[in-house]
C-alpha cells in the first residue's frame, strides 16, 4: 500500500481500486476463462416496510442451490451501519460480500470526513455497487437487495429497491424481492397500514413471509421443528433493533391460529 | 555536470530535528490517560478542526503540530486500518502494527525529505476482556523522526511535555474512574506553559475508547457530559 502519494479521497472502494486491486476482483472476467459457473447459493425472499418508528426489514433464512437446500440458517439482513439495513436476494456469495464492503464504505467515509453519509447518499452508493456488478449479474450472479434506513435529518424511515442495472427506486410503503416476492407483496398489499406500530409491523412482515413460504418452495418461512425463525430488524431513531426469536414465534402462533378453520 | 554539495549527515539531522521540535513546541498539548473504563484523550481545542480521531474499533489517534500534516497521517491510519480489517478480520487491526506503520513512514520522511514533519502523534488502543491476549490497553507515541515509544498509564505530546509529564507522574494512579481521569487531564493541560490556565469544557476536545462497549468503542464527550464530570 502506498501512503504519502496514495489515494486521498473518502471512498473505501476507490481506495481498494487504487491501492489494493486484488481485494476487488472483477469476477465477470472469470467467465471468459471458465465459461459457465457451477451452481451457487441463492437467497430467497426479503420484505421491507415503513412503520411509525422507522423502517423494518425481514427475510427468511433459507438459501437454495438449484432445487437443493444450500443453507437453512443463512443471514440475509445486514446492519450496514447504526441507522441502515440491507437485505439480500440473489447470488448469496457476491451479495454477502457486497453487504460487508458497503458497511466498510459507510464507516470509512464517516471516519475520514468526520460526518456520516446522508441516508440518500448511502442508497446511491449501493446503487453504484450493483451497477458495477452488472456483468456478473448477466451471467447469473445477480444481487438484488433492499435498502432501508432511518433518515436522521427528516426523522422518518425510508426504503429503496434496486434492479440489476443499479437503478434505485424509493418506495413509499413497502416492497419485497426474491423468489417468493410476488406472494409476499400480495400479502403486504392487503395487510399494510400506514403508521403501523412496532408490533403491527412485525406481524405484517411475518405474515407476508409466511405467505411467501406457503406458495414458493424456495422460501423458508418458520421452521418450528428446528426452531428457525425469519430475521426481523428495524432501524429507528436510536439505532438498529433485532427482534428476538421468542417474539417472532408468538406472532407466528397468533397468525396461524387466526387462520385455522372453525371445524378444526 | 554538477556535483551536489557535501552535507555533514550529523549536522543535517540535528538541524532538521531542531526545526521539527520548534514547530511542535508551538502547538498546544494533548494528554492520553488509561482509566478503569478504557483510554481517555484530552486536548485544548476550542475549534472545529479536530485533533483526536477514530481509527478503528479499539484504536484512536491524537496529533499535535501542523494540522495538515497530522490530519493526513490520521487519514492514512484510517485507510490502513479499514483495509487491514477488510482483508483479514476486525480483531486483526491492532494499535502496535499501526504505530509501526507510522514509525516507518515518519522515519523515512525524516531522512528523505528536506523539510521534516512537525508532528508528534499518539496511537491508543483499549483492551477487550472477551478476547484472550487482547485484554491490555496500549499507548504508543511516535515522534517526528519515527521514534516509537511504548507508554504505560499516561502520555503527553506537544509543547511543554516535560512539565505535563512531571505533573502526571506525581498525580496519576491506576484504575481511576472517568470523572477523576477527566479532571486530572484538564488539570494537567492547565499547567502547560503555552496553554490556558483555566479550561472550561468549551475549550476542550475529549474522546474515549470505552472498554465496556462493543464494535466501535471511540466516543466523543459532549460539552454537557464534560461539564457534569468537571463540576
Image: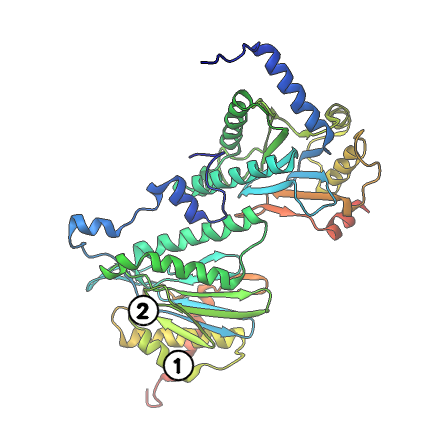
Examine the rendered structure and indicate whether residue B156 appears above or below residue B212: above
Residue in front for this viewpoint, A170 or A61: A170
Q: Give x and y (percent) for residue A139.
A: 22, 59
Q: Give x and y (percent) for residue B95.
A: 53, 33
Q: Say which residue label 1 marks.
A: A257
The answer to whether A3 appears left or right of B161 in the picture is left
User: Residue placed at 64% from the left, 37% from the top?
Assistant: B67
Q: Tag 2, which chain?
A: A
| Quadrant of the frame with the N terminus of chain B | top left
Distance from Cα at disc 2 to Cα at disc 1: 27 Å
| Residue A252 seen in the figure | no
The numbered mark at residue A70 is none
User: Residue placed at 59% from the left, 10% from the top?
Assistant: B10
The answer to whether A112 appears left or right of A178 in the picture is right
Q: Say which residue label 2 marks.
A: A178
| Residue A113 seen in the figure | yes
Label 1: which secondary element: helix
Amino acid at each position: 500500500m502506498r501512503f504519502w502519494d496514495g489515494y486521498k479521497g473518502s471512498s473505501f472502494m476507490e481506495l481498494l481500486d487504487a491501492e489494493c486491486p486484488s481485494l476487488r476482483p472483477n469476477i465477470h472476467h472469470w467467465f471468459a476463462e471458465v465459461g459457465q459457473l457451477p451452481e451457487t447459493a441463492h437467497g430467497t425472499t426479503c420484505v421491507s416496510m415503513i412503520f411509525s418508528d422507522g423502517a423494518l426489514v425481514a427475510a427468511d433464512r433459507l438459501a437454495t442451490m438449484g432445487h437443493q437446500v444450500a443453507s437453512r440458517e443463512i443471514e440475509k439482513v445486514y446492519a450496514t451501519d447504526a441507522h441502515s439495513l440491507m437485505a439480500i436476494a440473489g447470488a448469496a456469495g457476491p451479495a454477502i460480500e457486497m453487504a460487508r464492503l458497503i458497511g466498510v464504505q459507510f464507516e470509512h467515509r464517516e471516519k475520514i470526513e468526520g460526518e456520516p453519509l446522508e441516508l440518500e447518499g448511502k442508497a446511491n452508493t449501493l446503487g453504484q455497487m450493483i451497477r458495477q456488478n452488472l456483468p456478473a449479474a448477466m451471467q447469473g450472479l445477480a444481487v438484488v437487495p433492499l435498502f432501508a434506513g432511518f433518515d436522521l435529518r427528516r426523522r422518518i424511515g425510508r426504503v429503496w429497491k434496486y434492479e440489476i442495472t443499479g437503478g434505485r427506486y424509493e418506495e413509499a410503503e413497502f416492497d419485497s424481492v426474491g423468489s417468493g416476492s410476488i406472494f409476499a407483496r400480495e400479502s403486504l398489499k392487503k395487510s399494510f397500514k400506514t403508521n403501523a406500530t412496532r408490533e403491527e409491523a412485525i406481524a405484517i412482515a411475518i405474515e407476508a413471509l409466511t405467505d411467501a413460504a406457503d406458495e414458493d418452495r424456495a422460501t423458508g418461512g418458520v421452521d418450528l421443528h428446528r426452531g428457525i425463525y425469519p430475521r426481523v430488524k428495524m432501524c429507528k431513531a436510536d439505532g438498529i433493533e433485532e427482534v428476538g426469536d421468542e417474539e417472532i414465534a408468538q406472532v407466528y402462533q397468533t397468525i396461524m391460529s387466526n387462520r385455522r378453520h372453525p371445524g378444526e | 555536470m554538477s556535483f551536489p554539495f557535501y552535507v555533514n549527515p550529523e549536522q543535517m539531522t540535528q538541524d532538521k530535528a531542531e526545526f521539527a521540535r520548534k514547530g511542535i513546541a508551538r502547538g498546544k498539548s494533548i494528554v492520553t490517560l488509561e482509566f478503569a473504563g478504557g483510554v481517555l484523550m484530552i486536548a485544548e481545542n476550542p475549534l472545529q478542526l479536530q485533533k483526536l480521531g477514530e481509527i478503528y474499533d479499539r484504536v484512536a489517534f491524537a496529533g499535535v503540530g501542523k494540522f495538515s500534516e497530522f490530519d493526513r497521517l490520521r487519514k492514512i491510519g484510517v485507510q490502513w486500518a479499514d483495509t487491514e480489517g477488510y482483508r483479514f478480520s476486525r480483531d486483526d487491526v491492532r494499535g502496535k502494527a499501526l504505530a509501526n506503520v507510522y514509525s516507518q513512514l515518519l522515519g523515512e520522511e525524516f531522512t528523505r525529505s528536506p523539510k521534516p514533519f512537525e508532528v508528534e502523534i499518539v496511537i491508543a488502543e483499549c483492551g477487550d476482556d472477551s478476547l484472550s491476549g487482547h485484554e491490555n490497553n496500549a499507548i504508543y507515541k511516535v515522534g517526528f523522526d519515527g521514534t516509537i515509544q511504548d507508554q504505560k498509564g499516561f502520555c503527553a505530546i506537544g509543547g511543554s511535555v516535560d512539565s505535563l509529564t512531571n505533573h502526571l507522574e506525581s498525580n496519576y494512579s491506576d484504575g481511576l474512574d472517568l470523572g477523576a481521569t477527566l479532571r486530572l487531564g484538564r488539570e494537567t493541560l492547565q499547567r502547560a506553559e503555552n496553554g490556558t490556565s483555566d479550561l472550561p469544557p468549551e475549550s476542550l476536545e475529549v474522546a474515549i475508547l470505552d472498554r465496556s462497549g462493543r464494535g466501535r468503542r471511540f466516543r466523543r464527550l459532549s460539552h454537557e457530559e464534560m461539564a457534569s464530570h468537571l463540576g
